[in-house]
Image: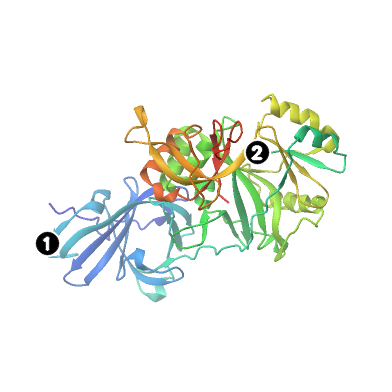
Amino acid sequence: MYAKGIKRKDFPGDESRLKPGMLVDYFIQQHFAKRRGPHYDFRIGDKNTNLFSWATNEHPTKIHEGERKPAARTNLHQHSYGSWEGMIPKGYGHGLVKSDTIGKALITRNTGKTISFSTADGKYPARYTLVNPGEKYGKGYWMMLRQKTPEDTGIEKTHYKTVDDPEKHLEQLTDKDIVQPKIDGALQYLSLHKNKVEMMSHRLSDVNKKPILHTERFFGHRPHIKIPRDLSRALILAEVYGTKNGKPIPQQDTSAILNSSLGKSIKDQKDKGIQLQAMLFDVARYKGKDIKFDLPYSERRKILEKVLATLKSKQFHLPDEHKGTEAKKVWEDIKSNKHHQTNEGLIVYPEKGIPTKLKHMPEQDVHIRNFFEGEGRYKGKGVGGFEYSHTPDGPIVGKVGTGLSDELRKLMHDDPKAFIDRIARVHSQGQLPSGALRAPALINLHEG
């Protein structure tokens, strides 16, 4: 039976009901209309708002980044109509309707003249904006724009120094050294430009070779903040981690949130009471120049303080700082699991030069090569773990089956290609002559 839409004279046209942060449904239908001709109907909304609708000649997913196409505003429709298929009888919309695409979208901004949203049902969100240029272009005339996403930063990840005997290294520190607790999360770049803020991984997408964006996952929308001129185009290094009731969650759980689809990530954060946080710990680019470690850390810290003041958000903070001569007390708190933020270790910042990591548990990176099946409650639902090598193309030398959260096991089971060749950080009891690690356990997946 044909599900009638709400007639134009009855709908209020109040697109402001699509508010930033709303996770809604979107539908694309093929409409072989007798009068208008074949086209696509794009509809977005939920059961409370009903479906705001636009007619386009081109399939929205076929619009390239940076392109805009005409989109004629049409009637508000009932939510149930979005998945309907059938023949509309004579009259408004007469013709065959076929369901094409059903998905989730996150409303990221709504100014009244523009409605921005990101697709939320896939791992890599596509960003769109519906633009209303005004009545002078004709009643109901809009444009659909597919937004460009950031290009590769071109910055290579810097590897910090490590030492074999952390406690001996602590003895050599002075008040000129700055010591910070090492929070182990996901390395991200915070990009600032004009009025836009992006949170993105150093790792590039296999789909478009651009940085993997976590902006919508982190903020729940896309913030627009006036950025001071000297901070525009700045890239800030951030460690992103999840908290619940003010305490950090296991890093495997943070990985699951960052690696799941946008819609699932936002739902899980809400349902589980998880808040993503970002510790801003260093500067990668400032005033158009890549920042090297020869710029004194005290100067880099001042830049971070200005960024924090600009963002004005409780999601961001700077690292706790201690003088080098105070490091032993912090180290003992971390080793005995008494520190309020971490049990990983310390980072030592000299005034100039590359920082040093001090870890109380041996860690190393391995390359994920294959997965093995889960057993018991994981059978058919999650992986048992992964096989690893020490180099990208080296021989497989062992397996890791512990340290994986249930959510991460499921993600790896459902989409193994998204994890093959990723770098995993593990800790172990040492390395055997064969190259295998003794009792390895996953700490986290590298985002960078």
Mark 1 belongs to which amino acid? Pro
Vertical side of 406 occupied by 99: above or below: below
Where residue 439 sits: x, y (%)? Answer: 54, 30
Rendering coords of residue 102 (x, y %)? 30, 53
Residue 185 visible here: no
Kindly give the residue lying farthest to the front in the view shown: 433
Using residue 382 as the reference point, say whether residue 246 is left or right of it. right
Considering only vertical position in the picture, is 422 above or below 322?
below
Of discs 1 and 2, which sits in the foreground? 2
Q: Which quarter of the figure has residue 34?
A: bottom left
Quick check: can you spot residue 148? yes
Q: In the drawing, what numbered circle is on residue 183?
A: 2
Q: Is residue 93 left or right of residue 16?
A: left
User: Which residue position is annotated with label 1?
Assistant: 89
Q: Residues within 10 Å of mark 1 (few under 14, many from 20)?
A: few
Query: Which residue is at a point 80% across and 53% down the rendered structure image?
Result: 299
Marks 1/2: CA distance?
62 Å
Write down the quadrant of residue 440 in the picture: top right
- Residue that extends furthest to the bottom in the rendered view of this protein: 137
Residue 341 locus on image (x, y percent) = 66, 32
Q: Quadrant of residue 285?
A: bottom right
